[in-house]
Image (tube, rainbow, N blue to C red):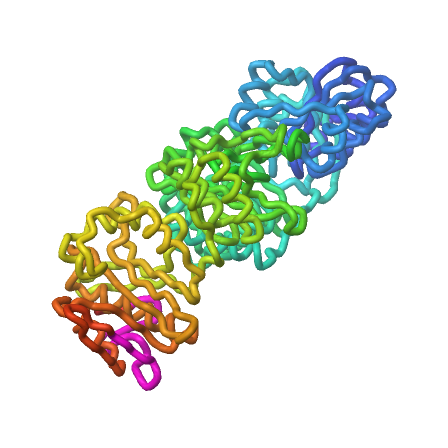
Amino acid sequence: MHWKDRYAPTQTSRAEAIARIPKGKHIFIGSGAAEPSGLVAELVAQADRFADNTVVHMLTLGPAPYVEPAYKDRFRHNAFFIGHNVREAVHAGRADYTPVFLSQIPGLIRSRRTPVDVSLIQVSPPDKYGFVNLGVSVDIVLAAIQASQLVIAEINPQMPVIYGAGFVPMDQIHAWVSEDNPLPELPRETPDEVAREIGRHVASLIEDTSTLQLGIGEVPNAILDALDDRKDLGIWTEMFSDGAMDLIESGNITGKYTTTHPSKVSASFTFGSQRLYEFLDHNPIFTFHPSDVINNPIHIAEQHRMVAVNSALQVDVTGQVCADSIGGKFYSGIGGQVDFIRGASMCPGGKPIIAMRSTAKGGKLSRIVAALDEGAGVVTSRGDVQFVVTEYGVANLYGKSIRERALSLISIAHPDFRSDLLDATKARHYVFPDQVAPRALYPHRYEKKVLLSRGTAVLLRPIRITDEQKMTDLFYSLSDKTIYERWLNAIQRKPEQDALDYLDVDYKDRMVMVAEVQLGAKESELVGVSRYYLDARTNYADAAVVIRDDWQGQGLGTQLLGYLLQIAREQGVAGFTAEILKENVGMLHLLHKYGLDIHSSLDGSVYSVRMPFDGGQKGMPTSAGAKQGQSRA
């Protein structure tokens, strides 16, 4: 027997189905691309017979005519997440917004703290066992069905069947109408260069075998595009998008190490292109589950190396994240951000990330601010935030003081706003009164990994404004002998101004390079530093290098000073000068490794050295075996 014949007793027309809904009842509408648009149109067509009916749902892709002013006495919408189709009504006061974690919405519905009496849903045709499938939106729809006294469904053969928890027996559907329409599409946004830069920074934090949660839009797409060299990634996400589909097809996403449902892609809902819907249909790699499963922070924390990437409208310099409002105007919703940020932070090896453009309004406003706008709500607290990423880099706030957080966030703000942000943080006494602001953009191109003679990997990189404490730690780890040889004085305490002087760089005329190591799970450490300061009158730069005692003798000094010399050449510096104690034999020996024409004069116990670059070597000794991205000394 054909299913239409089998279930003919509950088939009805749109008009008859909607006529069964009483006044004053709470009506749930299916989520996202699963909105039953035909039933919604009929609901409004019969508006005159309704009064004080509440319409509840998450974001929907279709129209929302019930929020128009003409129907304000008939319907009042309550949004769990504010989409573009209801935003004006919320702002005008014709609709409500309920701020709630996505993981908790099914529980609210089942407990009737948020009542649902009627559910209008869209499903696939029933299978031979009598089960329809919720398709692209399981999320909170399953809970709404379970709580409703009346379930009305559009049965659409174009709804993909997605494995998991989205199968519902036909006997739970009280009335159904037949539809045959394509699902609404949301075309994939092509990332611009700013989004791609953010994507590259986020991708730098994602290791092979990580489990990912991402949303939709230019930045998530750019992140996914930048992961084309990663292996055995997994997906545990509320929303699945087109970009992740590409990584499945290319073999980058396998789910091999995913803890729950290994070798599967676990999600709660999806919307995107028609190609995506076709890819999902009866595809055994997918398993969709309700929001209280996928968004449960405990389940998120159980995944392997969980990386959660979410966005923000504003982040203040202490790390507070506003994601659902612009000032006092509600814009979107809490959604699953806090669920995934907290879950990822509890996961061993997990990384909670806030990724956003540094500016809004065409560059007129900074998204990193001294204080959130009046009325803006904190979605993710400063205690939950770890990584914040913009196109200008990554700020790791985990375990950092307010001063360190402010400096980290200012360093990834748009350069046009950094000075004002620093002034504002000084006024709040968050940073030192003489704190310097970054002069220039951080040059990521100068980051390079090297391998020392004992096989230890070290990152050579330009200094950052946030390295103040690490520089202080480096100084106090040096022996008295090393301090005396470097500063030509028996310094007992490193002055604060001296530390700030190292941070006051423009990465051209004033350049400081550091050697950074990551030992186990500890915070990374600096084990060496080299710097040059240009004298504009002579075009020669005063250079210096110091290596922590326990890292000497491994070739690090050769690498660090040689790389500094290479950068100086690129910047058009004519040569180096230096003041060196005559007993500092190691430094004198090091300088001769580069094949430069060295001129020196001895004044007492100090050599004054002058090293012109013309006619010399390229900056690395020929015995160093330098290779692109890695070298051995």
Identify the image quadrant of the N terminus. top right
Q: Is residue 303 left or right of residue 393?
A: left
* Res. 630 in view: yes
Give how far across and how far down residue 273 sits, in percent.
Answer: 64, 49
Q: Is residue 481 left or right of residue 407?
A: left
Identify the image quadrant of the C terminus. bottom left
Q: Is residue 610 magenta?
A: yes
* Res. 586 in view: no
Give the residue displayed 35% in from the left and 84% down from the top: 614
Give the residue displayed 68% in from the left and 31% down from the top: 329
Give how far across and how far down residue 423 sits, in percent.
Answer: 52, 43
Identify which residue, 87 or 156, lies in the foreground. 87
Give how far across and how far down residue 92 sits, in percent.
Answer: 77, 27
Give the residue displayed 57% in from the left and 34% down from the top: 372
Give how far across and how far down residue 121 sits, in percent.
Answer: 68, 29
Q: Which corner quadrant of the image does residue 90 belong to? A: top right
Give the extent of the magenta segment.
Answer: 609-630
Q: Given the current orientation, which residue lies at the most extreme front position?
A: 604
Q: Is residue 507 magenta?
A: no
Give the residue displayed 73% in from the left and 29% down from the top: 91
Identify which residue, 459 or 203, lies in the foreground. 459
